[in-house]
Image (cartoon, rainbow, N blue to C red):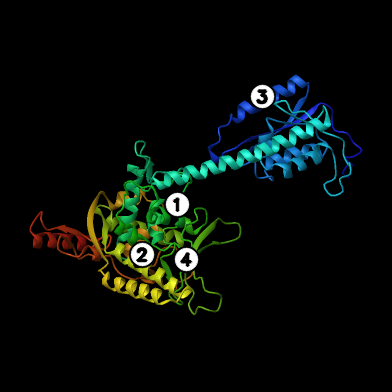
Amino acid sequence: MKRHLSLVPPPPNTASINIRLSKEAKEKNLSKAEMLVEARALCAREGIEARYVHIDEGSGAIRNRKGFIGWLDDAREGRVDTLVAFHVDRMTREGLPVAGMIMDVIYGTDTVTGQAVRPLVRLIDCKGLDSAGDREAFEWEFVVKAQVARSERRRMSERSKDMHRRLKARGRWAGGPMPFGFRVNEETGKLVPELEEAAFLRQCAERAWVPGAKLHGVLRWANSADGRPPRRAKAWTRTTLFKALTHTPTATEVDMFTADERASLRHILNPEGTNPEWRRNNRAGKHVASGLLLCEGCKHVMYVGPRRSKPGSPLIDDYKCSSPPGACPHRSSLNAKFIDQYLEEEYLRRFGDQPEWTRAATPTGFAAMEAAQQAMDEALAEFKTNPTPEAVEAYQAAHTAFQEADAPQTVDVTLTPSGRTMGEAWERAEMPERQALLKDVFGHIVVGPGNRGMRKLDLARLHFDHEPVSVPFTLGQDDPATYRPGQPVVVADDEDEAVARARAADEAAARDSA
């Protein structure tokens, strides 16, 4: 049963300390450690035992700070008889409203009736404030200091806003979280690319520009071992990666992308839709064929589920038809270990020794179209709210400009060697990347029904969307956009094309017959 606080006095000569370090408006503060040392020294001089310490980081204009509420609760609930703070402006910068809230606590009054319901509590700070002396003098001093703190907060906020406006007007960086890929040029105060981060973003963009690329594929690469983590998180999300690739910060002196490139990324990438991030701890995330297998009876993607061959035996993972019972005429299932091992061995046998080639792309014509479209949308919005003859003329002019700006939006794709083999890329890749590599070369795999009790993989059950391409790709002549991962590449400049193509075809045939 909870004790009645008004009948039980708090332990004598005990204190709760509250320390707040503000980050607002670039305010110059002591460190938390220094303020805490002074508060403890004050307790020692007063002969008080500091039993509780509450630390806050945030604006004094917020009254529901966790540490602040815990500090007051120590007095409300009778755990201490003294509240200690560094200064009034560390308690609050909200003035009279919170000053009254604190006075209710130290005078033990009910917040609704104003009646005394608890013993009085002493309030002291490191700057000489003490509620144990003259009550009227204390109240005047406390209220005045609280209001001064409130006024100081307003002035600091106004100075900060004015400073930001002045910096923006001069095109200088106004502070805040630094955008990924940039740093501040100390001489000009503007943003310039941070070389390593900018190189990573360009690699992401080159993957996005390849025809048919999707944001989730770029995201998967960015979070792989070959990518680079963001500054303040363990992994990229759709939103953070999309913003880093498409948003040009203000006060940029030099950007890593041209206007055409930024506009093309906004056009190509789409942060909406289903969440593509993989789960690292579920069963599907442990198998390379996840997402590749389709049930022959219903063509639904097969999921991974456990089973036991007999009671008490270890769990075995199977790929299973995902349709509800009765919805699929021929439900297929397949031992996950068998198919995973086969696909990995087949991939490395066919492509492990081949050099890895990557596609990159450069867009043109996107910025002009985006600007013309934006101008036409703004003119149309103005016409809808104010349908005057001038608004009609403005819209017609914007529409004409849009038609004249109908420049072709093109993406030039190039093919370059990565400097490693596909087998080395496989070994370095994490599970989501391996799944993507298999899908690139094999496509989806339709699994037919099998015989119960099979203890090995029956290859006759597997039907591939497409076989890996064995026709060589001639660099410099064939369209790089048609290249498929795993396709043999012939460099026509290095040797006679006919001989090179014949050699590549013979090598592919030898691998297929092995």
The 10 Å Cα crowd at callout 3, few under 14, some 14 to 19, many 20 or more, is some
Pinpoint residue 106: horizontal percent, then vertical percent: 81, 36
Pinpoint residue 308: horizontal percent, then vertical percent: 56, 61
Pinpoint residue 76: horizontal percent, then vertical percent: 81, 40
Left or right of 53 on screen, residue 22? left
Question: Would you name the residue on which mark 3 appears?
Answer: 38
Secondary-structure class at tag 3: helix
Q: Are marks 2 and 4 in contact (CB under 8 Å)?
A: no
Left or right of 174 on screen, residue 441? left
- Residue 433 found in image quarter: bottom left
User: Which label's residue is closer to the chain start, 3 or 2?
Assistant: 3
Q: CA distance from mark 1 to mark 3?
A: 42 Å
Report if residue 191 is visible in the image: yes
Question: Would you name the residue on which mark 1 appears?
Answer: 236
User: Which label's residue is closer to the chain start, 1 or 4?
Assistant: 1
Mark sitting on residue 267: 2
User: Which label's residue is closer to the chain start, 1 or 3?
Assistant: 3
Secondary-structure class at tag 1: loop
In the image, residue 214 above or below residue 157: below
Q: Identify the amino acid type marked 2.
A: His
In the image, residue 20 above or below residue 429: above
Q: Are marks 1 and 4 in contact (CB under 8 Å)?
A: no
User: Which label's residue is closer to the chain start, 1 or 2?
Assistant: 1
Mark sitting on residue 185: none
Q: Nearer the viewer, mark 3 or mark 2?
A: 3
Q: CA distance from mark 1 to mark 2?
A: 20 Å
Question: Would you name the residue on which mark 4 appears?
Answer: 273
